[in-house]
Amino acid sequence: MPDATLTSTCPLDCPDSCVLDITVRDDRIVKITGAADPVTAGFVCAKVRRFDRQVYAAERLQRPLRRSGSKGSGSFEPVTWEAAIGEIATRFREIASRSGSEAILPYHYGGSNGMLTDGFLDTLFFTRLGASRLLKTLCAAPATAVATGMYGKMPGVAFQDYVHARCIIVWGGNPKASNIHLVPFIKEARRRGAFVAIVDPVRTFGQSEADLHLPVRPGTDLPLALAMIGLWKDWGCLDSAFLSHHATGVEVLLDAAEPWTVERAADATGVRADHIRTLARAYADASPAVIRCGWGLERNRHGGQAIAAILAMPALLGKFGVRGGGYTLSNSGATRFDARRVLGMPPWTSRAVNMSQLGQALAGDLDPPIEAIFVYNCNPAVTAPHQTAVLRGLAQADLFTVVFDQLMTDTAQYADIVLPATAFPEHWDIRASYGRFAVGAVRPVIPPPGDARSNHEVFGMLGRAMGFEDPPFSWTQEEAHRAVLAAVELEGGTPLERGGVDAVTWEHDFPGPTPIMFGTVWPRTGDGKVHLRPEDLGPDPYHYQGVTDRSYPLALISPATARTISSTMGQYGIPELYVEINSDDAEPRGIVDGDLTRVFNALGEVVCRARVTDRVRPGVVLIPKGAWRRSSRNGLTATALCPDHVNVVGGGACYNDARVEVERRG
């Protein structure tokens, strides 16, 4: 058969939501490239370009499995779908009858952001079951709570509108690793004369790509932001007319900034005082000016407060009302969809369990204790904080564990039942982007391997096996697809084109031009104003507390990489784990590049090779997120060193609160 190239959408957890041209020969993927749409622009990331490795991986699951050895041994035997679903339904009924349905915990996250794959029939199933609710807090929970409290779900600046900006601040994120289609627009803006600044403990942009790098210490973004706000007040830069008409809570924020002189902030953050002044002046003088606010800076106990101060900046200086002016965090508010209404779903009123504290949840202290866990769309054995506690919980013989995944992951090794899932090139889905203004169809371009099945199929089977009579449990994949298409609305209340199951809407088909903040879109708060003192921040909204425990001298961060999406493709993207350490920290410890090291704290240790570099600032070490356990010398990864306390706003994971020591080994 001749090669066929089909257009689809990437549903993985990334704001770019790329349009893909997938070339197929004899029912096998031979090439994945980017389509020529306004943002994808003909290129894709290295991860998706080689996604065929995931599809055809040696670890790919093709039939249901039942554990035949001890937990974690990886010993399984094949069973039929009927037997696997029947066993799950029987065990769930037994647990619900004995201990109550809240003893069952669904655990899932962003392995796919498809609208049919997560938050649809799965949610209906666990709602009907009465299982515990999962608080999805590994990423974006504090940022979402703060942004919603300040602006409502107002869309931000579109990626392609960055070319109009005269000042761009990328704060707490690395577009080169996890938002690569923003990078060309930043480069074009700089070519046109824009001032580009990067605020990050890691140097992610070279000197030829950015004008200023502020290597802030992890967890000190709030003092930096407050010092800049204090400067603007002193310089008389505040836009009093804008604030009087469009903002509340201004004085609370200005009072919080008062104590933060530039010198005090420089001492707290490790950023040069003259660089703080340079950035403050560049942003104040430029229009349009835009801040790309990343999620890295929220991953500490007070990250929500830092997000609030940063998102307040364009309001304080009146940077809205022009194309390319404002901020970008999440643009998910441009798409509206109510899965509960489509499915006729009742309220889910069960107790809530924070996914960032899985190790605690499995320790047996809840009432009722967790007796069963159903894991899908994620790999908590390597992504949840306090890895040793998570592994200890998963290893419990009396915990009934189901893992529904494409691969035999580190988590699947602990399962009692393993169910084989389809990958996105093998099923229908719909992707609503949280970065760009786009909704697109995910279409099957190849058949699934063996007897792998989609999330829609499997949760339909489970619902019917449990005797749930809701009609959606019997919908075909196409019926579900059409039901979602009929209910999705884009910015301005425009429904999706009813073009059938393969309907696609992109920016150039988007109703009208991309939004202008405070020009064509406005805060979706009760009074239509921006609230600079959002309620979620509590009674002391811009409180900052520095590091109090100095038992371990180095701050550990575990950011995204260009080769993995969290743990997806982690088995290839990070074949051998490493720690990046600044030469100023390596030299007194006798560590040279390539040495085997022990990175440790009270929670655990990771044995891996050192990469001595000046890319990370002194006092900070970096172990990339998403690595599988096989990549380290002792089977533990960065999350073994991360605490499982949570953010005071939104209950988010505090990966970047980790403090460690590093020593040369052998």
Image (cartoon, rainbow, N blue to C red):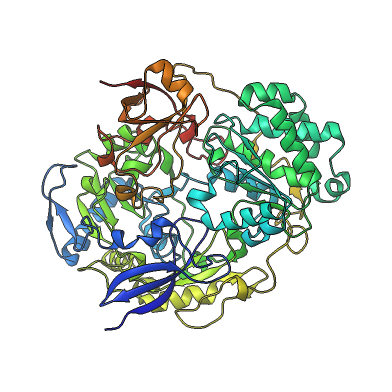
Between 30 and 284, which is closer to the camera in this rendering? 30
Instruction: Determine the residue positioned at 25% across, 20% down.
Output: 666
Tell me where residue 629 sits by quadrant: top left
Which residue is depicted at the point 75% across and 64% down?
520
Numbered circles on residues, count: 0
Residue 273 appearing in the image = yes
Q: Is residue 545 left or right of residue 106?
A: right
> Could you say where residue 513 lies in the image, as x and y percent from the top left?
69, 70
Does residue 154 appear in the picture of this structure?
no
Percent position (x, y) of residue 370?
A: 31, 42
Q: Is residue 554 above or below residue 373?
A: above
Q: Quadrant of the N terminus?
A: bottom left
Q: Is residue 41 above or below residue 374?
A: below
Residue 557, percent from left and from top: 46, 34
| Spot occupied by residue 294 in the image (x, y as percentages of width and height) | 57, 45
279 lies above or below 373: above
Is residue 554 rendered to the left or right of residue 157? left
